Image (cartoon, rainbow, N blue to C red):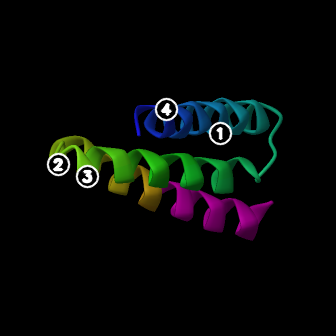
Amino acid sequence: MKNLIELGQMAATVLSVAGVLLNNSQNRWCFPLWLASNAICFGYHWRARLFGLAVRDVIFLVLAVAGWIQWSNYG
């Protein structure tokens, strides 16, 4: 189970870094990567009963959706 958790954390990190790289090149596909990364983090934080971090992840999810919508309307 520990290896699965580490694999998920690694996936979330890779998705986040890829999202930043796409954002730096002004590519709107950064938002789905951030959605996936934050969803993974939310799952881990919720299961670990780290509810403050889980709430933060929900806020990040909402911001990623809002950013994707806004960028789609203007980009």
- Secondary structure state at the residue bearing disc 2: helix
Tell which tag, 3 or 1, sits nearer the viewer: 3
Q: Quadrant of residue 73?
A: bottom right
Is 37 or 11 nearer to us in this picture? 11
In the visual, does 28 lie left or right of 66?
right
Read off the magenta span. Answer: 63-75
Is 25 or 58 nearer to us in this picture? 58
> Marks 2 and 1, how far apart in space?
22 Å
Against 17, residue 36 (above or below) is below
Amino acid at dot 2: Phe
> Marks 4 and 1, how far apart in space?
18 Å
> Marks 4 and 3, how far apart in space?
18 Å
Q: Residue at x 16, y 47 (%)?
A: 49
Which residue bears the numbered disc 1?
15
Q: Position of residue 57 (x, y in %)?
A: 36, 49
Q: Quadrant of residue 68?
A: bottom right
Amino acid at dot 4: Asn
Which residue bears the numbered disc 3?
46
> Is 72 colored magenta in this rendering?
yes
Tell which tag, 4 or 3, sits nearer the viewer: 4
Q: Position of residue 56 (x, y in %)?
A: 29, 46
Against 62, residue 49 (above or below) is above
Q: Quadrant of residue 21?
A: top right
Q: Sort mark 3 into few (<14), some (14-19) or many (20+) by Cα contacts within 10 Å.
A: some
Of the two numbered discs 3 and 2 on the same chain, state the one appearing first in sequence: 3
Q: Residue furthest front?
A: 1
Amino acid at dot 1: Leu
Amino acid at dot 3: Trp
